[in-house]
Image (cartoon, helix red, strand yellow):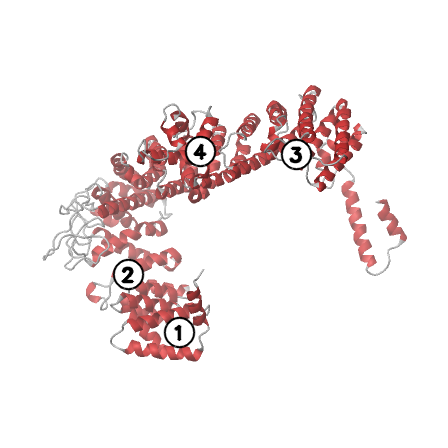
Amino acid sequence: MYSHGSESLIKQAREIQESELQKFYSRLMKLLQGKDLGHETVDCLQRLHLILSATKYTRTLPPDLQKRLKSLLSSPVEQLQVLSSAVLRETLPLAGEEANYIQENNSQLNSHTAALLLAQAGSRDVVSSLCAQLLRGLENRPSEAPPNHSLTHTLPIVNTVLSHSPECITEDHVTLLSKKLVDWLRYASTTQGGGASSGGFFTASRSRQPQPITEMDGTVSGDFFTVLCVGQGFTEDQWMNVYSFSMLRHWLLTFHSVSSGSIADTANRLQLSLSLSHSFSNDDRSEIDGSVVSMVSATSSSSRLLPPKERLREKAFQYCQRLIEQSDRKAQKRTDSDLQKACLVEAVCILDCVCVEDASMVYRAFPCIKALFGRLSSDLSFARVLLPVAQFYLNHGEMAAVDCEAVWKLVFGRFPAELFNDPFLAHELLRFLRLNLESVQLRVPHYTCYFPNLLKFLAWDSPAVVDDFVDLLPSLVTSGTALELLHTLLDLPCLSATLLLQLRSTCLPISESGGRGLASMDAFRNPSFRGLFLFLLRSEAGSGDTIDRLSTLLEFLSEAADWPRVVRCAQTVPILLHIFFNTVITVADKTLLGQVILVLLERSSLLLNIPEYIKDVHRVFSHQLLRLCKLHPSLVMDQSHELLDLAGATSNVYSKEEIYTHVVWVLGEYLSVSYDSRCSVRLITSCFEALEAVLFEITSSASPPGGGRPAPRVITTLMNALAKLASRSHDLIPRVSLFLSKLRNISRSGAVPWCADEEDLVSIVTLGEELCSLLKTPGVAQSVLNPPPHVTAPRWHRDTNVAMPLQLRALTRLTQAHTSQTQHTPASPSTKHQLRVL
């Protein structure tokens, strides 16, 4: 929302009259014609930008003013460049001037001009023309370039076009730029520039004479220039080296997939590429004057026989190997150390891209990648660097026949366990899993065992990563992990609190004089209870489904129920539970689903004491219990003892209303010989007596202190369940009829303590009378209360073996005929008679 002052300015800008606008244009024109473009000019340009951007219509500026604004794009004052570019982006170019406009500004390229050029390019042809002119300028020698022309802004513009309109770059452009990238990457000058650095990447001591470039540890570089070289100032081709590296991976991914040539050509290319790794005798010089031969990675002149795409791939390979070698040098500044890590990430990604395109390079790259992993794996500060290494192992480890177990133990083991509070690592690791989920499931057999570790990211920062786990959770649900995963999801708030305690215990003293300690922190540090917390912090699955003393742990963590991080974590659990159940139904057999039901019943009483969380989990349990029992009705018979234990406890009526109601419903619905032949009269009688006792207790006495009144839904569900059970064992009918009659008499005698709402009481009494009337005829009660499946889900309109489809079609035709006749004449008696018969 805008402030009141901002809204007022925007309103004035929108309501400005055309006459006032023309006066403003004239005033700005006079200011721009002056020699000193001071604060007043900047203020007017800001006002003009507000006027142009505040309306939804695109305006056209007067030609003279537009020409003046275009001249400001090359102003030495960057603020004027920014404002003029912003203003011109809000306007339309003059009619028929688009091509000339690009031509005029091509000689004064900077980032602000580039943004304007792309904004003013209204069609694909204009963008193609812009690319052609930019790439054509790359062919000019420095002496032939226009005045003040710089190539340093060309590649960023091309990279932008590459992202949005790659079709605008032709095959000839690809070949040309590939050749230029080879020169910039491999043959940039190795002496420092004469002027001071233009900033951004490198700083070093001053020197009057051009000196050789140095490495980050201060030694003189003996190889070709890269982005990790240090110098006082840098030449244009060195800056182009930096720009080329920054867009290299994007370029390779977009245009350098292996072309589908003949088998012989492909074999020749692979053989030639393999030969490069064994030939270092000759020099591969560029045509650029002043190139320096690499002392470390000079390759055979046979690489010059490669097509431009393959040659760029080879030079990219050499460049990345050089960066990996440079990253082993100790940087003298922290910023340089960060740059080393960033370049390592990009270098490994480019090597992976190159190896995906040319499988023969896997064997050349793997020794370097393996050595890099061995060097960095013990230092967790390089965790984000090691993720691209893991990607390389995932993509090429099988081809190279290397053991990847150490990689996965590091990525899925140590990273989440020790760096769960690193938001950047969490994002990149979970993104790595999402993008490679099928490959990870196929090539990392123990991936699902790491779910206790991966869920630490969710427990620590649920809002940021819940979308990732919505996609990842189904892959973690298997027949072997289902039960433990369900317990772990329910314990996520506890895990969140434990992670907080773990961090606090490392930064807070063991005892604080005069301070109020946390009981949970004392328990966390107590060796007697340490095992409870260590179970939550385990790295891999398989050590047990849940904690034996879970109630003790929940008591310790009860004070964490209002911690913001724990509350946010609890809010995501119901979403994940639905995803879990949707998946477990597809992977589990009936035995496992029965065990899942037992977990639902057990854990309904063992949850962290967050009222809203408990309510939401009970709602999910109730929904999924009905779903599982509908899918396998015999599960009710298998778990009848546990279901009866929950349904027979009166306290559950008040503490677990949601799940209690649904347990009673499934007992009344599916405890029948028609669903399971093992169901006996004795079991039905036992269930009836348990439910009868609960209903009698909650309707014959006042509610327990603090328990409230029973919900009307619970009472009506119990009444229906008793009637259904009685209809299956007729000996029980007199008992339920007598009870329902007493219930009716009690309601008529005066105030009822267990139901305060008069409308609810009337509904309960009405249902009791209906059930009593129905049970007077047991045969009818059996059909109504326990209808067979073909009655509750009829398919008569689809079954061709019965006469119903024929009757429906006849009725449809007669109804249509009757409708059309009534629009003109009254229906005949014969037609009415036919309709009555049908």
Disc 1 target residue: 96
Pointer 1 local density, CA inside 10 Å: few below 14, some 14–19, many at least 20: few
Position above or below: 164 against 510: below
Compared across the picture, whether 604 is left or right of 26 comes to: right
Residues at marks 2 and 3, CA–CA distance in whole angstroms: 73 Å
Q: Are marks 2 and 1 in contact (CB under 8 Å)?
A: no
Q: Position of residue 754 (x, y in %)?
A: 67, 34
| Residue type highlighted by circle 3 | Val
Seen in the picture, residue 234 relative to 27 is either above or below; the reply is above
Upstream in sequence: badge 3 or badge 4: 4
Residue at the image point whose x is 80% and y is 32% from the top: 773
Q: Position of residue 222 (x, y in %)?
A: 14, 46
Residue 727 in picture, x, y percent from top left = 75, 27
**Is mark 3 in CB contact (under 8 Å) with mark 4?**
no
Question: Is disc 3 placed on a helix, strand or loop?
Answer: helix
Please identify, in this view, whether the residue under mark 1 or under mark 4 is nearer the observer.
4
Element class at badge 4? helix
Return the mark for residue 290. Answer: none
Distance, label 3 to label 4, CA atoms, is 31 Å
* Quadrant in the rendering for residue 290: bottom left
The x, y position of residue 669, in whole percent, is 68, 30
Who is closer to the viewer here, 730 or 646? 646
Which residue is tagged 4?
A: 494
- Kindly identify which residue carries mark 3: 714
The answer to whether the residues at label 4 and label 2 have Cβ atoms under 8 Å apart is no
Q: Earlier in the sequence, mark 2 or mark 3?
A: 2
Dots 1 and 4: beta carbons under 8 Å? Answer: no
* Disc number lying in front (3 or 1): 3
Residue at 37% across, 26% down: 526
* Residue receiving disc 2: 153
Q: Nearer the viewer, mark 2 or mark 3?
A: 3
